[in-house]
Amino acid sequence: MLALAQSIAINGALLSGLYALISLGFTMIYGVGRVLNLAHAAYVMLGGYVYFYCLQVVGIPEPLSMLIAIAVCAGASLATYVGLVRRYMSNPTIVFVSTFILALVINYLVVLIWGMETKNVWPVVAGVTQFMGQTISNNLLCTLIVSWVCISGVLLFVRKTHMGRAMRALAMDRKGAIVSGINPDRVNLLTWTIAGALAGIAGIFFGSYTYLVPSMWHMPMVMSFAIVIIGGLGSIEGTLIASHIVGYMQTTTTLAIDERLRGVFALIIMIIVLVVRPKGLFGK
Amino acid sequence: MVNWITSVKSFRWWLVAIVVMMVLPFIVPPSFLRICIMANFMAIFAMSWDMMSGYTGYVSFGHPFLIGLAGYVSAMLSHQGGFQPPHIVLPLYVTMPLGIAAAVGGGMLFFLPSMRVRGPYFSLISLAFLMILSRIMIAAGAMTGGDRGLTSLPYLVTGAVNNYWLSTGIMFAVAIGLWLVARSDVGHVLKAIRMDEDVVESSGLSTYRFKRFAFILSAITAGIGGVFYTHYMGSISPAGAFDYIFLLNIIVSTVVGGMGTILGPIFGGYFITFFTESTRTLLEGAWRFMAYSLVALAIVYFRPGGFYGIVHDIAAWFRAKRRGGLQYDQVT
C-alpha cells in the first residue's frame, strides 16, 4: 500500500510535469491568438520520433539530438502558424478543423517514416536512485527537473521580459494591446515557436518515459484539453495546477483502479468544472 | 410567407437527383452500388453534423458519440446471445427506434448542458464525451463485446440493390427534411447565431432554444444514420465507431461540401467516399490516408466554402453576366 502510494506520488509528479509542458504551449497560443491548435499534441509525438531517429538510428550525440528534435518541433509549430493558421486567425472554426486534419497528416507522416510498431527510446540519463525506500530511475528524476526548469523559464519569460508582457497584454485585451503598439503577428510567431519547442521537450521525455507509437498523441491531446479547461483557457497558473490534478488523477487510475479507464476521471472533472464554473478554476 | 412558385421551382434539382439515383441500379454493377451505400451513410452523418455545427458554428467533435450510441443500443438489444442472463433478443423494429431515442436522450443529457458554453469549450467537451463513451464501451466488455465489439447482428435487408434502395431512400428523406428546415426562418436564425450570437440574443430570441432545436434534429439524424449503418454492416466495434478517422470523415465531408448548406455535405459525403474507394487500389494503407488528409487540408485551406461555395460563385457569376451587373444579394 505504501509502495503504491509512493509510486503514485512519483509517477504522478512526472506525468503532471510533462502535461504542464504540453498544456502551457496550448494555452499560450490560445491566450495570444484566441485559436486552438489541435496539432499541438502531434508535435509531442514528432519530437519523440525525431529524437529517437537522430540518437538511435543516425547516431548523433545525445545533446545534439535533443536540440534537433526541439528545433524540428519549434519549426513545425511556426510553419503551422505561418502556413495554415495566420490566414484564418479571425475564423476559429477553420483553424480548428484544419489543425485537426494537420494532426492526422503528422500522424500518417510518422507511420510512413517509422512504421506502426512501438519503438523503445534509450533513457536520457541511465541508472537508478534510492529514495524513501523506492527505486527511482534517474531518467524520471531528470524528466521532473527538466520539466520544472522549463516551466519556471516560461513563467519568468512571461512575467519579466518585454515580449512576455506583450503576450499577457494580448491575452487580456487584444484591442488595447494593439493600440499600445504591440504587433500581434510578431507575438504570435514567438508564441507558436516557444509552444512547439516545449512540445518537443515533452516529446523527448514522453518517449523515454513510455515508448513511441503513432497513436501516442491521442492521450496528451485530450488531456491537455481537459487541463486548459479545468485551469481556465489562457491562464498559466491555472494550467500548472490543473495539470497536477489531471496528472495525479490519471496515475492513480492507471496504477490503482483500471488501466482501461485511464483519462475518464479527468474528463469527468473537466465536465463538472465546465458546468459549475465555465471559465475554469482560474479563468477570467 | 414562402413564395410557392420559387419553392416548387427549387425542388426541380431534387427531382433530377432522385431520377439519377433511381436509374443508377440498372446501369452500374453491385460493387459500385456498395460504394454508393457507404456514400449515402456518410452523407447522412455529414448532414447531421452540418445541421448542428455548420449552422450554429458550435463545432462538435462528439458526433460519433451520437452515432455510436444509437448503433450500440440497437446492436446490444438485437444481438443473439449477448446481454446474459436476461437474454433478450428484440426485433429490429423495436431496437432501431430505441437506438435513435438513445442518441437523442443521451445527447440531450450530455451535450445540451455543454451548449451553454461557447466556441472551443463546446468542442472540447464534446470530444471528451466521445472519449469517455469509447472507454466505457471497451471496459463494459460483457455487454458490448469490449475491444472486438459485436458481430453477426441481424440485417434489415440483404443484397446490394436492396440496401442501395433503403439507404438512398433514407438519405433523401433526411436531406429534404433538413433542407426544408434550413430554408425556413429557423435556419436563418441558426446562421445568425453562427455569425454573432450576442446580437441574436439581444434581439430578443433565446439562442439556447434554437441551438437545442438544431441539436435535437442533428441527434435524430445521427441516430437514424447510426442504427441503419450498424444493421447494414452487421457489426459494431469501438475501433470503427469511435475512431478519429470516422470523425475526420464526417467533418471533412461537410467542410469539403460546404458548411451550413445541407446540400454540400451530400456532395462531400459522395466525394470523400469515392475518393477513398478509388485510391484503394492505387495507394496502400498509410499513403492513402496521407493523400486523403492532404487533399482535405488543401480544400479547407483554399476553399473554406467548399464545393457549394464554388458552385454558388459560378452560378452567381453567370446570373450576373446575363443581367449585366453584379447582384450583391446573391452573394452570401
Image: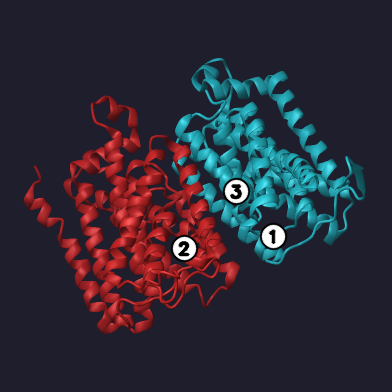
Please identify, in this view, whether the residue under mark 1 or under mark 3 is nearer the observer.
Answer: 3
Task: Out of B171 and A15, give the one closest to the viewer.
Answer: A15
Q: CA distance from mark 2 to mark 3?
A: 19 Å
Vertical placement of residue B204 versus B178, above or below: above
Whole-percent x, y for residue B267 in the image: 33, 61
Q: CA distance from mark 2 to mark 1?
A: 22 Å
The subunit letter for the residue under badge 3 reads A
Vertical placement of residue B34 versus A229, above or below: below
Chain identifier for the cyan-coloured part of the image: A
Amino acid at the residue labelled 3: Gly
Of mark 1 and mark 3, the one earlier in the sequence is 1
Q: Is A148 on the left-hand or right-hand side of A112? A: right
Can you identify the residue that label 2 sits on? Answer: B241
Whole-percent x, y for residue A24 in the image: 65, 35
Please identify, in this view, whether the residue under mark 2 or under mark 3 is nearer the observer.
Answer: 3
Can you identify the residue that label 3 sits on? Answer: A263
Residue B260 in sight from this viewpoint: no
Q: Residue sitting at 63 percent across and 58 percent down?
A: A215
Amino acid at the residue labelled 2: Ala
Q: Colour of chain B?
A: red
Can you identify the residue that label 1 sits on? Answer: A213
Secondary structure state at the residue bearing disc 2: helix
Q: Based on the displayed image, in which of its 4 quarters is residue B118 positioned?
A: top left
Secondary structure state at the residue bearing disc 1: loop
Q: Pointer 2 and pointer 1: residues touching (CB < 8 Å)?
A: no
Q: CA distance from mark 1 to mark 3?
A: 18 Å
Q: Residue sitting at 42 percent across and 57 percent down?
A: B250
Vertical placement of residue B257 versus B229, above or below: above
Q: Based on the displayed image, in which of its 4 quarters is residue B191 positioned?
A: top left
Task: Out of B66 and A166, give the one closest to the viewer.
Answer: B66
Q: Is A260 on the left-hand or right-hand side of B215? A: right
